Structures are given as structure tokens and as C-alpha cells.
Amino acid sequence: MKRVLDSLRLDLRYGVRQVSRTPFFTLVAVISLGIGITIATTAFSLLNAILFKPLPVPDADRVVHVYASTRDGATLYAGIPYLDLDAIRNSGAFSGVTAWYHTNVKVRANDGTPERRRVGLVTPDFFQTLRIQLAEGRTFTSDGTQPEIVISERFKRRTFSTGETVIGRPVLLNDVPFTIIGVAPVSFRSIDPENPQIGWIPAAHSVNLFSGRFPLDRSTRHFRTLGRLAPGVTPSSATASLNRVAHTLAQTHPQYWRDDHGSTLRLTLLSQRESVTRPNPDFYKSLALLITMVVLVLILACTNVGGLLLARGVSRRHEIAVRLTLGASRARLVRQLLAEAVLLGTLGGALGLAGALITTRLVGRFPVFEAFDFALDWRVLLSVILVSLTCALVFGATPAAHA
């Protein structure tokens, strides 16, 4: 074992000398590889934010999305009638149930220019159900009748001066005044990453923003429902309880709780990841397209660096011939050339990681992406390491075998 480690250490030391001997070649190779890994890491960060990061709330695995669906669960409906939320609350499956939806409104704050942004209309117990501790201020009153708004931390930072007190300040939504009562923590941006909100108001105030009445009738399914599973309740047992609720609702309000074929609707529980992927039939097509583009970029980067190494190998024929004459084995030469490739891959990976830190911050500033948490975690770091080593072996194997 000691001999293997000593041999590896010597190979890496020789690789460092060779890489440092040709700084221009090293710079071009590392930049080429770094650009490819930057693009790949940024894409991995996006996928990680959508598919793997849980909701930024305590005990996120206990929070589930509740959908009305067909009996086989294949077809999901947009939401649940607001008037039927109490039946779900009384099912015994949840310690808390909340509902929300987002809509575009004209927002004006701090005497700024009006702009069209999304706000969330939520039940008054929204933050309590999710167990979100506000960074400043308080949550809504229990009846949600006051014209109050909890704003996002990003909206506060973008709209108001640093250190400025915002509690009690007015915000105009469609020219209707709302009072800021709280600021959400920086970790919480939205339940729906594709639709970030600048703030949340009690759902009852939809009547003030739009023509109509509240509560909405059962034909309107704007609201999406979240439930926090009660202690000791599993998703399967909660589903059984909810199906009894759905059956009762279908008997009481058959025109709203039956599908087009007359069958009773059921209630289906989805995790955060499933709630992003299942209702969107084109999600996996978009995912496949993104992965294909990333693979093509990495292949192009590996091809460029591999071509550079092949061209460089021509100028090193004399060196390799001398080393063979002096008794070096072909296997040892291949290992040393692969060690050089691994060093280039490591440098390219480090540059790609630094580039990804910059690009994810820049991308995160766009409103369409502001709800995504692009922070690099262990999944992204592991993907960078694997991509760097794979690229090193791919672009280093052919020159090594040729040499």
C-alpha cells in the first residue's frame, strides 16, 4: 500500500512540474474546461433547487400538497374549493391546513414606480401552519380581515433603504393600501419556485383587489392546499382519511366533486418534488433537453482539451522515448499522463465552481428565478467533483493511450 501511495505521490509531483512548465497551454486548457463545468454546475444548481431541496420550513417532510384528482390519481385538478377547506381540516389527518394562490397586481411602495408583480393570497394561518418564523414583525390576525401584508426579504431589500424600518409602512396593491406587518425570512421565497411572490396578504382581500365576492363559489379552484401531517399520521393513513372526506363532499356537492365521467373525485397527497413535476407533463421533456445540452457542452470542452493534449503529445515524443529507454514502463507513463489530466481537470473544476458561484448569483437576481435557492450544497459539490474527474479521464485517456 505504501508503494502505491508513494508512486501516486511521485506521479502527481511530476504532473505538477509538467503543468507548470507550460503555463499558456495550462491556461487555455483550464479555461476551456472551466467554461464547460460552469455551465454544467449552474444547470445542476437549478435542478437541485427544483428537485432535491425541500421546502424552506421546519420538518418539511411532514408538509404535503393536497390535490383533488380522479380515482386512479392520474389526473390532478388545479386546486380545492376554498369553501371545502374546513372539511379537510376536520379530517384528523393534519395538524394544520392552509391554502394559497398567486396573482399579478400593480405594486407601488416607498413612492417608487408602479410595477406588475406577484403576490400570494393565503389563509390567515399560512405562516403558522408552515411554522415560519418571520424575520421582522408579526403574522396575520386570526380572521384575516385587516388589509395587511407580509413582504419578502428580497422585496424589502430592493425597495427600501438598508436599515430602514418597514413595519407599518404602506404598500399599494392595485391602488388599494395595505400595511406592512412583517418580513419573511430570507430562506423563504415561495411555495411555488416558478412563481415567486413579493408578499402575502389574507385571501379575503381578493374582493378588494378584484371584482367579485369572497369566499369564491365551489366552481373556482384557484387555491392550492398544503397540509402538515399530524403527529403519528403517515401519508397513506392521511390519504385514507381524505378519501372518506372526498366521498362525503361528493354526496353533498356532487356537481363539484365528480369528474366528467361521473366518478367521485379523491384527494391525493404529493410531496414538494412531486408537486413540481407531476402537474407539468412537459417537465421531463425540458429536463431531458437541459441534460442533453449540458452533456454536449461537456463533450465539446473535453474534445477541445483532448485535442490540445494530443497536439502537445507530439512535441513530447522525444521525452517519452528517452524515459522508455531509461527503463520506465508503459503503464507508468500512462499513469503519469493521466495524473496530468487529473490535475487539469481539478483546476478546471475549481474554475468552474468559482464561475458557477458568480453565474448563480447573477441568475438569481432575475425576478423569474428569485424564488429558487441556488446555494451550492453537497449535491452540487459532488456533481462538480464527478464531472471534473470524468472529464479528466475522458480527455486524458486518448492522449495517454496514443503516447
Image (spheres, helix red, strand yellow):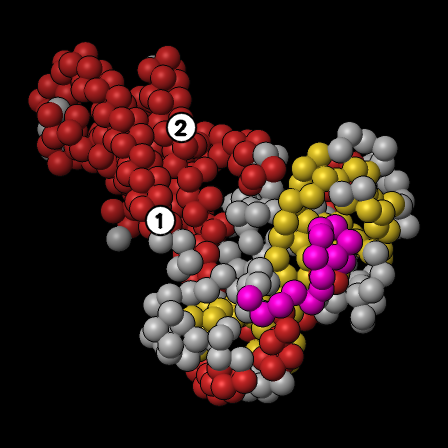
Is residue 78 something one can see in this rendering?
yes
Q: Within the image, what quadrant is residue 305 found in?
A: top left
Helix, strand or loop at disc 2?
Answer: helix
- What quarter of the picture does the C terminus occupy? top left
Place of residue 203 in the rendered image (x, y in percent of width and height, measured from the top left): 71, 61
Q: Which is more toward the observer, 226 or 319?
A: 226
Type of amino acid at the residue the image marks with label 2: Gly
Give SS at disc 1. Answer: loop
Q: Nearer the viewer, residue 38 or 163?
A: 163
Callout 1–callout 2 Cβ contact below 8 Å: no
- Image position of 59 with respect to 55: above or below: below
Q: Residue at x 71, y 51 (%)?
A: 210
Image quadrant assignment for residue 200: bottom right
Closest to the observer, 3 or 111:
111
Work out whether residue 162 or residue 78 is closer to the camera in this orientation and state it.
Answer: 78
Q: Specify whether 46 is left or right of 99.
A: left
Find the magenta span and give its range: 205-219
Mark 1 and mark 2: Cα distance apart in space? 31 Å
Residue to which mark 2 is pinned: 34
Which amino acid type corresponds to the residue marked 1 in the rendered image?
Asp
Q: Is residue 76 above or below residue 109?
A: below
Judged by its main secondary structure, the magenta piece is: loop
Residue at the image position 81 percent from the left and 31 percent from the top: 112
Residue 282: which numbered mark, if any?
Answer: 1
Say how many tags the image has.
2
Residue 185 point in image, percent of width and height? 72, 53
Which of the numbered marks, if any, corresponds to residue 260?
none
Residue found farthest to the left: 325
Q: x%, y% of residue 143?
A: 81, 70
Q: Is residue 214 magenta?
A: yes
- Could one spot residue 131 in this view of the protein? no
